[in-house]
Image: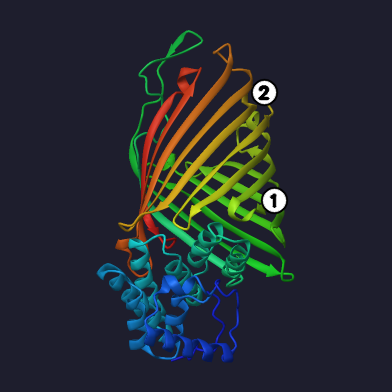
Amino acid sequence: MTDRRSEPRARDPARGLEQRLERTKRFMLAFALGLFTMGIPQVGFAKQSSVTGFDAVRVLVEYGRYEDAMALAESFAADEKGKTLAAAFTQALILEQQGRLPEAASALRAILSQNPKARNVRRELAGVLYEQGEGNASLHHFELLAGSASSAEERRFYERLAARARTIRPWSLGGYLSIAPSTNITEAPDADLVYVGGIPILPAKKKSGIGYGYGVDGSYRFDLDEISSITIGGGVNGNWYRDTSFNTSYFDSFVDYRREMGDWTVTGGVVGQYVMKGEEPYRWSLGPAFSLRHNMGRKGVTTLRGLWRKLDYHDRDALDGSETVLGISHLYAISSASSVRFGGNVSFVDAANDTNSYVRFSLNAQYFREWSFGAISDISIFADDRRYQDITYLAGEKRSDQRIQASLGITLRNLAVRGFAPRLEYAYTQNFSNIDVYDFSKNTISTYLTKKF
């Protein structure tokens, strides 16, 4: 068993230190024993010192004084529920100290599912996941802690840990497989008969089906120095149905340069995409992209993104052209257990045939929350307005579309097995158009496993 008592404990923002001096630890041990002997409540002590009862319990655990640590932790509790929580948390610390990291992570997740606002538990879980090499999972919690930090010093501390989680290894590899039934995979109009330019037309029929969503992605990072790196990566995602004519696959690739400058992060590079529909070539695109991220501490994180790409369709030359996108988003943490993200985009597609050129404005918002009954939910709404630049054939007018999409996702963390939790997603989409043939609605459900909880 590895003895980690003298290793740096990166999860102590109250002290703001990454390495402890052994002299300080001896003092803390003596103080912890004194605290245990006197039975001083944590609340009163916290008002007089930056060292909390939580720190004292931790030191006792690190020195193998498990029974004393358990008794001290329970002495802080005001009722039986608090004692149960204190005992469970201390037991998780003991498991971590013994090197039983998967068990410690499972125990901490169980506590957090009932007490999502418990910052001590969350930061301990983030640290355990980091020690296990679970970079994305630990990053999720470090970012929540950083976004809801009460001071600039604490925020910077968690941001440093988040940066470490991003670079826990130079490579990344991920993937998913989901079941995705949909009520309208053809995106056909709701009406049985539509009129275009006053002419009645029989639209395509709605088709429902159960498909599979899939995705695999990977990347490799080359660190140039402590604040800059170059990353290359790619992936494939899409949907598969029994009727292969509805299959869609997206092959993505990128190369980018990233540089961190204090509260600012700049990223720039090249992105490419190849699309197949019905297992046939459909379109490819290539162009530069950039992002500018500003971390404003407790006020949140704002990100500006831009993209230009050339569009080339396989056998639809009228759609060839380019796309320009500029967007902004803001993430605000209400607490370590809830946050809201909102933003918007403006884009312009310049096609060879102006009938297919359009300006698009979109808005989006998402609310994320962890609940005390063991679920993590997010509610999203997306709306966009697309205005085409030339008169549509037969319709005799310029096409104008408006789309609204509302979605709900739930992660059931209490049903997690081996670090994976089931996630359910539901989305409703409604498209409105002044040309009836483009009116449609559909419902989609997806279910898959995730480690982001």
Q: CA distance from mark 1 to mark 2?
A: 32 Å
Residue nearest the observer in this picture, 40 or 129? 40
In this view, 208 is above or below 130: above
Q: Residue 339 or 256: which is nearer the viewer?
A: 339
Q: Residue at x 44, y 72 (%)?
A: 44
**Residue 99 versus residue 220 in the image, above or below:** below
Instruction: Tell me the quadrant of the picture where the N terminus can be found.
Output: bottom left
Q: Secondary structure at mark 2?
A: helix
Q: Which residue is mark 1?
A: 292
- Would you identify the image quadrant in which residue 415 lies? bottom left
Q: Residue at x 60, y 31 (%)?
A: 361
| Left or right of 333 in this view: 296 | right
Q: Nearer the viewer, residue 177 or 244?
A: 177
Quarter placement of the C terminus: bottom left
In the image shown, does 316 or 161 lie closer to the viewer? Answer: 161
Disc 2 marks which residue?
Answer: 354
**Residue found at the very far left of the displayed protein:** 80
Disc 2 residue crowd, few under 14, some 14–19, many 20+, Cα 10 Å:
some
Which amino acid, by three-letter code, is at mark 1?
A: Leu
**Callout 1 touching callout 2 (CB < 8 Å):** no
Up-down relation of residue 152 to residue 360 (above or below): below
Q: Is residue 209 left or right of residue 296?
A: left
Badge 2 amino acid: Asp
Q: Give coordinates of residue 53: x percent, y percent.
A: 44, 77
